Amino acid sequence: MTDYSKIVETVPAEKWAPLSEQLIGIILGAKNDKIPNSLANTILLHMKNGTAKDKAGLTALLEAAVLLDADKTTAIADLANKINPTSA
């Protein structure tokens, strides 16, 4: 099982907000809708509370984006890794 919070930790905090927006775009544009209800509820709670751009919110968004469109999410993660190559 992937530890998405550890992946989020490799991204500089100043990149979390733009990454969050990109992941939300992937989630909303996904053709497949196979996301567990508990994960969807977690994301909605983070969005409602304004915490979608912090570590916990970004972790949930990353998990959902990987489930819905792993290829696009991987491309974004690769870009984030290039932005912060010392974390690799």
Image (tube, grey):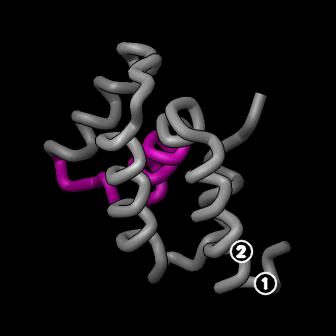
Residue 47 or 73: which is nearer the viewer?
A: 73
Q: Position of residue 61 (x, y in %)?
A: 44, 45
> Residue 8 sits in which quadrant?
bottom right
Separation of marks 1 and 2 at Cα, in angstroms: 5 Å
Is label 2 in a helix, a strand or a loop?
helix
The crowding category of the residue bearing disc 1, from other C-alpha atoms within 10 Å (few below 14, some 14 to 19, many at least 20), is few
Residue at 70% x, 68% y is 78
Is label 1 in a helix, a strand or a loop?
helix
Tell me whether circle 1 and circle 2 mark residues in contact (CB < 8 Å): yes
Q: Is the magenta region chiefly helix, strand or loop?
A: helix
Is 40 on the left or on the right of 79, as rendered?
Answer: left
Residue bearing mark 2: 81
Give the magenta part as a residue range. 49-62
Residue at 39% x, 21% y is 33
In which quadrant is the C terminus drawn? bottom right
Residue bearing mark 1: 85
- Relative vertical location of residue 2 with respect to residue 73 in this rendering, above or below: above
Residue at 34% x, 26% y is 40
Q: Position of residue 47 (x, y in %)?
A: 21, 46
Residue 73 or 81: which is nearer the viewer?
A: 73
